[in-house]
Amino acid sequence: EDGDGMAALHRAILLLGFADLSMEQGLWPELHGKRLDEVLLEASEEAKAAKVRSRALEGQLLFARSRLLFEKPSAGAADMDAAVSSRQEATELLRDAAVEALGWKASKVEAQLAKAKAEDGHEAPLSAEQLLAAVQRCGARAADAEHVLELFEA
């Protein structure tokens, strides 16, 4: 191991590519005697334990596992349960990753949004465009728009 866990993260990234190619080709390969969904789960656990943690990568690994299990030709009830569980955890991790990428405190955003709603006289929920405009008035960078929209869709 490399001390900071980067080797595990690099393996996880390569595994994502391999899993994507396998799914595109309709293959269900085994790696070192383990099913691909098991290897993806192990990789997500390794990524979680790494000193340099990437919730986005963890979420992508679990999302790939979920997709793989949903597409499994002989999927049973246990596979479907594991697929749903992986999908739910992936969604939470990807949402957390979007929040981390923004680097804002939730309390500041909530206060600014409340202020924007009060100024604009909106009682209805903000649309995506209104939300983007409000956070840009708070000093959001243009690069933050993607993460804001991810959170809006969540």
Image (tube, rainbow, N blue to C red):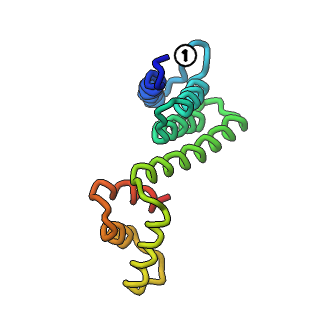
Foreground residue among 105 and 26: 105
Residue drawn at point x = 41 percent, y = 87 percent: 121
Q: Is residue 35 left or right of residue 95?
A: right
Q: Which residue is mark 1?
A: 31
Determine whether 59 is above or below 37 in the image: below
Determine whether 111 is above or below 59 in the image: below
Q: Residue furthest top?
A: 32
Q: Residue furthest left?
A: 142
The residue tagged with tag 1: helix, strand or loop?
strand
Determine whether 109 is above or below 114 in the image: above
Residue drawn at point x = 52 percent, y = 31 percent: 47
Density class for disc 1 (Cα within 10 Å; few <14, some 14-19, many ≥20) is few
Q: Quadrant of residue 78?
A: top right
Residue 18 in view (yes/no): no
Foreground residue among 8 and 127: 8
Residue drawn at point x = 46 percent, y = 33 percent: 52
Residue 6 in view (yes/no): yes
Give the amino acid type for the residue marked by disc 1 in the picture: Leu
The percent coordinates of residue 18 (x first, y second) are: 44, 24
The percent coordinates of residue 33 (x first, y second) are: 61, 13
Q: Residue furthest bottom?
A: 121
Q: Is residue 150 left or right of residue 86?
A: left
The percent coordinates of residue 91 (x first, y second) are: 54, 48
Foreground residue among 129 and 76: 129
Q: Is residue 122 left or right of residue 74?
A: left
